Image: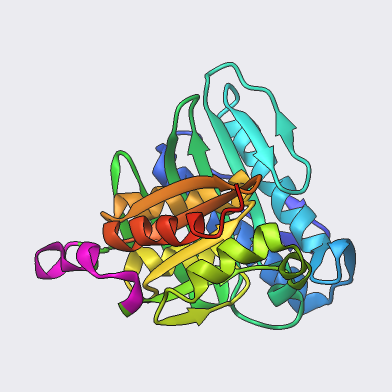
Amino acid sequence: MTTGRHSALELDPTLDDYQLAAALVREAGQLALLMRMAGLQSQQKTSVSDVVTAADHAAEAYVLEQLRRCRPDDGILGEEGASVAGTSGRTWVIDPVDGTYNFLHGSTYWCSAIALKDSSDVLLGAIFQPEEDKLWLGGKAHPATLNGGALTAFKDDGGARNATPLAELGAATYIHPTWLLDPLCAMPWHSAATSAAALRMFGSGSCDLGRVADGQLGCWFQHSCPEWDWLPGQAIVRAAGGATDTVRINGLDWFMAGGTTAVRELRTALEAGSVT
């Protein structure tokens, strides 16, 4: 396939789902990076920090084309508008560039991500951070890996990481400043944030979740995540032996990932901010 001056691979339909997912995020991420190097303009979506570029659209178009050829019976849902109704009961969920604000401003903390789900659960996730050359992969039928190496942080020391309390962990999170003006959102967020040992806010949920899976980050929480921001990382954290959860508080859905104890304590802290 050719997109402007940039070309990407035609993928082999005989690849299994995990191989296909890994190839898709790697090719989409490299395509976006090449386009950024050639120069990009952006368009604002909902705010100055919520932007979209031609690279987002081109990377999603590439993944869409490859999936329609390699998995013609599956559905497809993309952040930038891709929508295909499948007949298999399975759907690929695409985030062509997660962390577009970072991407546009020259940070390396962005990625391409994809998940495969069925009617009841997420089956697999793949996340590729091009400028760090990090590829996380995992799901129900595949152990979590980083660049092919098994992720064992949740299993080391007899699984002690699952028992580590929130107060001893750094928590990755994200909240747009305007949401801090709304007490229905700010109160749960503040309760959870002040329960952790430290906070990290990097601007790419999928990059964060990959690092929760590999042990670089202690845990993660965020509200109102669309499926493309949540499912790829959720699948990988679970495959690594970690825990995930969601809870609805004050009309907003909150998403959590980390060790078993940390996720339970994050949920308790978030619920402490409820006004109902």
Q: Residue at x 48, y 76 (%)?
A: 194
- Name the residue at 66% across, 45% down: 251
| Region of the chain picked out in magenta, as a range | 155-167
For residue 219: magenta?
no
Image x and y of residue 198, in percent: 44, 83
Q: Nearer the viewer, residue 66 or 253?
A: 253
**276 above or below 266?**
above
Question: Where does residue 27 sit, x and y in percent of width and height?
Answer: 59, 58
Query: Does the image show residue 102?
Result: yes
At a point 68% along the width and 23% down the height, the residue shown is: 85
Farthest-out residue, top: 87
Determine whether, in the image, residue 217 is placed left or right of residue 11: left
Residue that sits furthest to the left in the current view: 158
Q: Nearer the viewer, residue 253 or 99?
A: 253
x, y percentage for residue 232?
49, 50
Which image quarter: residue 50? bottom right
- Residue 166 lies within the magenta run: yes
- Tell me which residue sits at (69%, 43%) in the image: 78
Q: Position of residue 164 (x, y in %)?
A: 24, 70
Q: How is the image coloured?
A: rainbow
Q: Quadrant of residue 109?
A: bottom right
